Image (cartoon, rainbow, N blue to C red):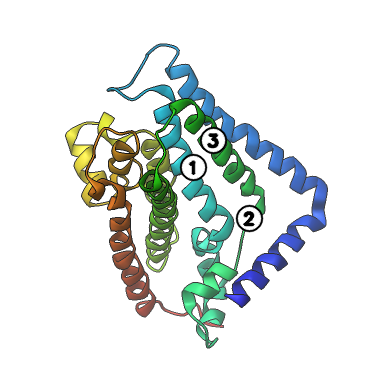
Amino acid sequence: MKIYFESLAMHLKGELEYRVNFILSFLSQILVFFTYYFIILALFTKFDHIKGFTLYEVLLCFSIIQFGFSFNEVFARGVDRFDNLIIRGDFDRLLLRPRSIILQVLCSDSDFVKSSRLIQAIIVMIVALVHLHVEWNIWKVITLILMLFSSCVIFFGIFLAAAAYCFFTVQGLEVRNVFTDGGKHMAQYPIGVFQKGFVWFFTFIIPYAFVNYYPLLFFLGRKESILYAFSPLLVILFLIPCVLIFYWGMKRYASVGS
């Protein structure tokens, strides 16, 4: 982990070498993020609720998903941009080093400009929690922490599976974006508002429902079973095949040569 944190410090120092560019990019990301936020606000100017979910309940879902996605954009950018390692031939160099491949990929890149989205997600979450008037107890705190944790885990898993895709082709990025950016935009709403087919797919295939739907029902007091509170832990099971797929793809990787 020391190597990872040293690499983060190095990437941050590199980005701050061009301070004006960093500041302008940081501000532009703030504007981009709030377009998503205002779309939800505009939606609720026409509707009081969406299948029983109010504005601030949806904003809580939105903030949790955006938190996990932005966290990975900042701290796991190397996985998200894995195709660059393949295209440039840099992945061959990683294979020669006596360190974990995934750790090296994590260390290869970061994007602190996207930390603006992470900060904004936290702000939106606080605003939503203030207006929801949650009856706090230790289980509600644990549920919220697990929701944030599982959001980070699921996007890391998706990024890792998308990275494995690059071992076979670096083209077809739109296919990958369906499950990364596309999944993020869909999962920022409670999964229960969609049709049963979508609910099934995003519960048992890509388990967004265990991130911000089933635990949300417990958090809002709509379900009393403590199993709903700990359901985000099931997302860890999703990470296992993602890691296996990555290493499976790596075994079939052919060097670019030199």
Residue underneath mark 1? 66
Residue 111: which numbered mark, if any?
Answer: 2
Q: Tell which circle, 2 or 3, labels the residue nearer the N-terminal end.
A: 2
Q: Nearer the viewer, mark 2 or mark 1?
A: 1
Badge count:
3
Q: Residue at x 43, y 54 (%)?
A: 149
- Indicate the amino acid at tag 2: Asp
- Indicate the amino acid at tag 1: Gln
Secondary structure under the numbered disc 1 in the rendered image: helix
Q: Position of residue 193 (x, y in %)?
A: 27, 29
**Between 234 and 87, the one nearer to me in the picture:** 234
Residue 126: which numbered mark, if any?
Answer: 3
Direction from residue 105 to residue 217 in the image, left or right? left
Q: Where, by quadrant of the figure, is residue 178 drawn?
A: top left
Quadrant occupied by the C terminus: bottom right
- Separation of disc 2 and disc 1 at Cα? 15 Å
Q: Tell which circle, 2 or 1, labels the residue nearer the N-terminal end.
A: 1
Secondary structure under the numbered disc 2 in the rendered image: loop
Q: Nearer the viewer, mark 3 or mark 1?
A: 3
Q: Residues within 10 Å of mark 1 (few under 14, many from 20)?
A: many
Contact check, label 2 and label 1, Cβ < 8 Å: no
- Indicate the amino acid at tag 3: Ile
